Image (cartoon, helix red, strand yellow):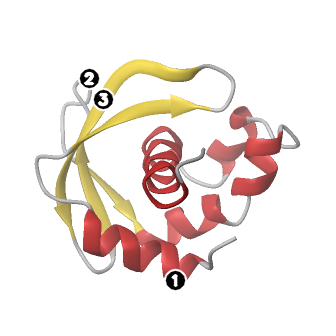
Amino acid sequence: MATFDEVWSWLQDNLKPSQTIKNWSVIRGDLGRTVTVVCVCSGCIEVDPPKAKNIQVVPKQDFKKVWDVWSAYKSGELFRSTIPEKTRYVTYILSILHYYEQEVTGNA
C-alpha cells in the first residue's frame, strides 16, 4: 500500500479543477452523485458538491486521517459511520481516495 505522502503527491499532480469525481462508499459503491474539484492546493483540496451552499475546503490532514484507516474501511473492519469522528468531509475523501485507487491500481 502506498504511503500517504505518495497518495497526496499523486492527487496534487493528477486532480484538476472542474474534474468530477463520483461519490462512492464501500457498501453501496457509486452513490449516484458527484463532487467537482475546484482547486488542488498544497494543504487542501477544494470541492464543490451540488447540495452544499459553499465550496468545501478539505484539509490535507483530514485526508491523512482517512488514509490511515482506508484498508480497514475497505475490508469492512471499520464502518463509514465511525469515520466522521475523524473528519466532516468523509464522503468527499472516500470518493477521492477511491478514484485514486481506480486510476493507480485499476482496483478499488
Q: Quadrant of residue 13?
A: bottom left
- Disc number for residue 34: 3
For badge 2, the amino acid type reads Lys
CB under 8 Å between discs 2 and 3? no
Residue 5, placed above or below residue 11 = below
Q: Quadrant of residue 100?
A: bottom left
- Please identify the residue farthest to the right as the structure is shown: 77
Residue at which label 2 appears: 51
Distance from the alpha carbon under mark 1 to that under mark 3: 25 Å
- Left or right? Give the position of 67 relative to 8: right
- Disc number for residue 86: none
Residue at which label 1 appears: 5
Q: Residues within 10 Å of mark 1 (few under 14, many from 20)?
A: few
The residue lying at 69 percent from left, 36 percent from top is 80
Residue 2, placed above or below residue 77 = below
Image quarter hosting the C terminus? top right
Q: Earlier in the sequence, mark 2 or mark 1?
A: 1
Distance from the alpha carbon under mark 2 to that under mark 3: 10 Å
The residue lying at 62 percent from left, 79 percent from top is 3
Where residue 66 sits in the image (x, y, percent)?
Answer: 62, 58
Distance from the alpha carbon under mark 2 to that under mark 1: 30 Å
For badge 1, the amino acid type reads Asp
Q: Nearer the viewer, residue 20 or 82?
A: 20
Q: Nearer the viewer, residue 88 or 27?
A: 27
